[in-house]
Image (spheres, rainbow, N blue to C red):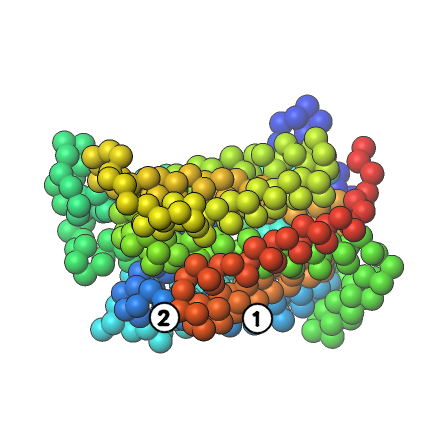
Amino acid sequence: MAGYAPTNENAAGGRLPDSALAWAFYEGVRTPYVILIKVYIFIPYLATVLVGDPVSGQALVAKLAMAYGLFAALTAPLLGAGMDRVGRRMPVLAAITMAIIFCCASLWWATPTGLGLGLTCAIIFLAGVLFAYSEVLHNSLLPFAAPPDQTSATSGLGLALGSAVSVALLAFVLWAFALPAKMSAPWLPASPLFGLSAAAHETDRIVGPLVAIVFALGAAPLLLRGRDAPRGAGGGIGGSFGQLKLTLKSLRSNRPMATFLVSRMIYTDGLTAILLFTGIYAAGVMGWGALELTALAIVVSCFLAIGGLLGARLDRCFGPRRAIQVELAIVIIGQLTLIGIAPDRLFYFDYTGSPVWNGPMFTHLPELAFVFVACINAVGICGCYASSRSMLTSLATPETIGSWFGLYALSGTVTIWLGSALISVVTSTLGSQQAGFVALVALLAAGWAGMLAVREPQRA
């Protein structure tokens, strides 16, 4: 159990050790890929501009997410088992990080006459797989980076930093590119910075290089100075298969872990799909453009930070199992409410009211209600992510933490393709973006019920 030992003498006093801070900071600079590229700015651009139709775009993005999610789901557990055999994660994590950075930077050329739709989708596929791999490696370093009584705080801090960095980047995009293309003010540039053209959607595509730069700079502390796992027993691909097989066999005698992984697979189906498609949903249903989506992302990301910190607090007060159930209940109620909001509908009732204020965005009551409910959803989603990771570390041992996080990635990555598949099928069949989100609520409810059967270990 040496991997769980405190990494410095200040750990017991409440201060996170430097290795834990480096781990959390890596999460902080990795999250903008999700917020700016996968959710709020680039993917909505792909769906509405490169594809040309929001409904068809949502269905295509769902199929794309299903494809890279399924591939990662089938290979991530083997990667985790292999890392348990090798021990050291940093060299592989560094290579994967550099590849993700290259993918993000290349999105600048994602135009109909540049990369085109096909090659852009191929880059998104590769980045999605690599991002899932980085999660396995990064998550499996948590028990070595933080003492056991501070893993929950470290996990929550990482998610909160991710939201904070995302907010900073989104605020810069809003000030430098989105607002100057829509309005003039003394505190705004006269036109989008760097001579970017909003008509050519350069102000949308610039988020790829921005995310790449931030990720490259922010990943350095962990990759260069972070605390790596100790060297393992070694072995080739056969040893990795053997390690994975042992881990799977141990599920028979480890009922709490097995029940948790299955339950997480179900509820994360809904959580990740909601997070992934919020931007596309808002663009198609509410008719919002880059300005509104960037502003929405900033506000929601602030509440994602609150969710990460709330998850750590609920873990300490009630334990991760009950914390997960509370957070899932928040999202279930919020999502049911969000489906009943549209420009002409407020909480399932017809709405024909006039603007409530004279501003550049969110001027009608349904728009403000959409933002409010999306923020409440964000608190529950991010809190549930933090509590879920804490739950696994409380059930695992450091000797097999890579294998368990490989299966954890499997259960979480199944989310991407299964939840996306549900959205794709229902959206395409019924021709409605709202209908595509209804099935996700059932997944959240089933996952909540499954957590009732999980027995968590006694807390010190």
Q: Is residue 63 left or right of residue 93?
A: left
Q: Residue at x 52, y 40 (%)?
A: 379
- How crowded pointer 1 is (Cα within 10 Å; few <14, some 14-19, many 20+) is rated as some
Residue 438 in view in this figure? yes
Q: Amino acid at mark 2?
A: Ser
Mark 1 vs mark 2: give the one in front.
Answer: 2
Tell me where residue 283 appears, x and y as whole percent: 33, 55
Q: Secondary structure at mark 2?
A: helix
Identify the residue under disc 2: 56
Which amino acid lies under the numbered mark 1 shown in the image of this protein? Answer: Leu
Circle 1 SS class: helix
C-alpha span from label 1 to label 2: 21 Å
Number of marks drawn: 2
Q: Position of residue 361 (x, y in %)?
A: 26, 41
Query: What residue is shown at x 65% (from left), y 34% (from top)?
Result: 314
* In front of the other: 268 or 106: 268
Q: Is residue 188 left or right of residue 421?
A: left
